[in-house]
Amino acid sequence: MGNISWWKWLGVALIIYTFTAGMLVPLQHGIVEVTPRSARTGEQVTVELTGYNCNYDQQSESLKAWLKLDEEKTLGASSIEVLGPRRLAIGFDLPAYLPVDRRVQDFSLILESKEDGTAILPTALLVTQDSIDPEKGIALWVNTAVNDLTVSTGMTFPFRPIIYETIRNTYFHVALWLSMMLLFIAAVVYSVRYVRNPMPKWDSKARAFTSVGLFFGILGLVTGMVWAKYTWGQAWSNDVKQITTAIALLVYLAYFILRSAFEDPEQRGRISAVYNIFAFALLIPLIYVIPRMVDSLHPGAGGNPAFGSEDLDSTMRMIFYPAIIGWALIGAWIANLQYRMDAVREEWIERLD
Amino acid sequence: MKRIILLSLLLGSMFSQPLLAQSATPDFMRSMGKMYVVVAVIVVVFIGIVIFLTYLDNRLTRLENQIHDNDQKQ
């Protein structure tokens, strides 16, 4: 197609793939909520459950449910009544004692469905006991082994409480952010080349990649705020990740203000190249080190990597990695337009002289 | 500059739409498993790209005018 390089088409193809697969693949079967959330030992409790991506009324025979403490201590449901396609009433005969030496213990709820796959709700039910006797409790709680769990086949995304469908933002917010890193790395490479060999084209390329990187960074911050509004509760909660990101973006914004302060292209090129290297050196601790050292709402806080096996399964990786490359290539295309424009101006000025 | 103000007014009116809808039905953004949050994020990314293209367009126009004016002088 004319003069358009292959890598630009590759970027477009990857983004189309990201949108198509990212939006079409369904979420796994999950539990949205249960009521009540607390009970006492020795009573019969009926938990009303609302599911997601499920069809309970078409498979009432095969449904199974457990309250689970750990691999050994579980309690099977005494009755399961289908209230609707997405609603169940699950009865549990809670024994008189808990298998722990604490008054209150939380249990996960496991719901097994042959058709939709297994759903788990952590901390589903808080059970309170009046008198403590762990030995009796252990004998009472080892009653049903959790087995024959159905693993959902086919392509699905994990179901996470609170996150729900917004897990798809991984391909837009998170992938955009990582491609911003790639663009800033490209910019820093060109800045280093300018410091070693001050040719105007290296400065122009560094400027172009930094501007697209900053643009992706602002998009990352704004999309993060939209996402945060509906998962953390408010768009801006002064979270450490939000603050350090804003500082990093301001540092990069200052790069452009610095550039506009110089008339002489050589002076501008040299100083802004050095500043760009400094800005990149600041970016790494600001967005990768500090948020991990303190508490944050953002995944990746408290020392764990941002994407553990919990957050990204193999299906998501199949879309996530192409998405990063796709967004980076689109960003490189925009940068490409900018430095070609600079080159035209350069050539024109040379011809005038 | 005028165009930027117009564009931001337009975007502002676009964003107030879902906000109004939200107050009418309190859980519009949270309905369908919060699917509309994904839609909002994609819309933000697209609007961002359009704004960036507008900025590039303006820079290119300025360069074109510079070259054009200079040719006329000669």
Image (cartoon, grey):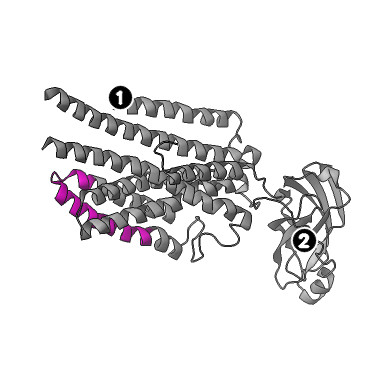
Residue A191, percent from left and from top: 26, 55
Residues A145 and A197: in front is: A197
For disc 1, the marked residue is B2
Q: Quadrant of the C terminus of chain A?
A: top left
Residue B31 drawn above or below residue A190: above
The amino acid at mark 2 is: Leu
Query: What is the residue that sits farthest to the front in this orientation?
Result: A2
Residue A93, percent from left and from top: 85, 59
Give left or right: position of A242 versus A307: left
Asked which quadrant contains residue A222, the reply is top left
Residues A318 and B28: in front is: A318
Helix, strand or loop for disc 2? strand
Mark 2 chain: A
Residue A258 drawn above or below residue B50: below
**Which residue is pictured at 47% across the width and 31% down the height?**
B15
Mark 1 chain: B
